[in-house]
Image (spheres, rainbow, N blue to C red):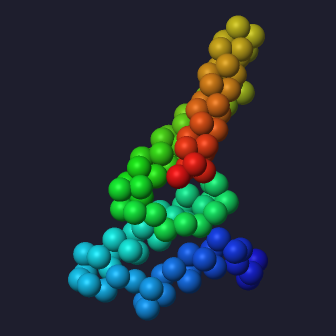
């Protein structure tokens, strides 16, 4: 759709040149990176906030963990679809559930920051 949601608008507003730290190129680059990380975090916790570079680095690690778990879930789901033994299906589905709980815990971490 052509409309953008509120968190995307906050992201775009934050990228405005007049809001950026223009002390030097490194600060300007960090401002841009922090804004992008803030948008990625907002996709999960629903709120766009620009955080410090340290918090942004922590968020990147959490976002990477979430993405890795999602990929593992997809792989396990595809394996489970092909599995014919009930015991194996139960093991796979249990692991999927564990990964989903881990994702929820990571999402809570992002929400608390």
Q: Determine the image quadrant of residue 57.
A: bottom left
Q: Is residue 63 above or below residue 12?
A: above
Q: Residue at x 56, y 83 (%)?
A: 13
In this rendering, position of residue 84 left or right of residue 16: right
In this rendering, position of residue 69 left or right of residue 87: left
Q: Closer to the camera, 83 or 18? A: 18
Q: Position of residue 40 (x, y in %)?
A: 54, 61
Q: Residue at x 35, y 56 (%)?
A: 54
Q: Position of residue 92 (x, y in %)?
A: 65, 20
Q: Is residue 26 visible?
A: yes
Q: Quadrant of the N terminus?
A: bottom right
Q: Is residue 33 above or below residue 112?
A: below
Q: Position of residue 98 (x, y in %)?
A: 62, 25
In this rendering, position of residue 82 left or right of residue 31: right
Q: Is residue 79 visible?
A: no
Q: Determine the image quadrant of residue 11.
A: bottom right
Q: Closer to the camera, 85 or 63? A: 63
Q: Residue at x 70, y 8 (%)?
A: 87
Q: Residue at x 46, y 63 (%)?
A: 51
Q: Determine the image quadrant of residue 26.
A: bottom left
């Amino acid at each position: 759709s052509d409309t953008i949601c509120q968190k995307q608008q906050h992201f775009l507003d934050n990228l405005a040149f007049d809001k950026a730290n223009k002390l030097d190129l490194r600060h300007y680059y960090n401002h841009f990176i922090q804004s992008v990380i803030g948008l990625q975090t907002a996709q999960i916790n629903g709120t766009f906030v620009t955080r410090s570079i340290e918090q942004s680095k922590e968020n990147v690690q959490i976002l990477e963990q979430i993405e890795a778990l999602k990929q593992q879930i997809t792989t396990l789901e595809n394996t489970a679809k092909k599995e014919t033994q009930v015991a194996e299906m139960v093991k796979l589905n249990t692991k999927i559930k564990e990964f989903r709980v881990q994702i929820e815990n990571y999402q809570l971490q992002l929400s608390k920051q």
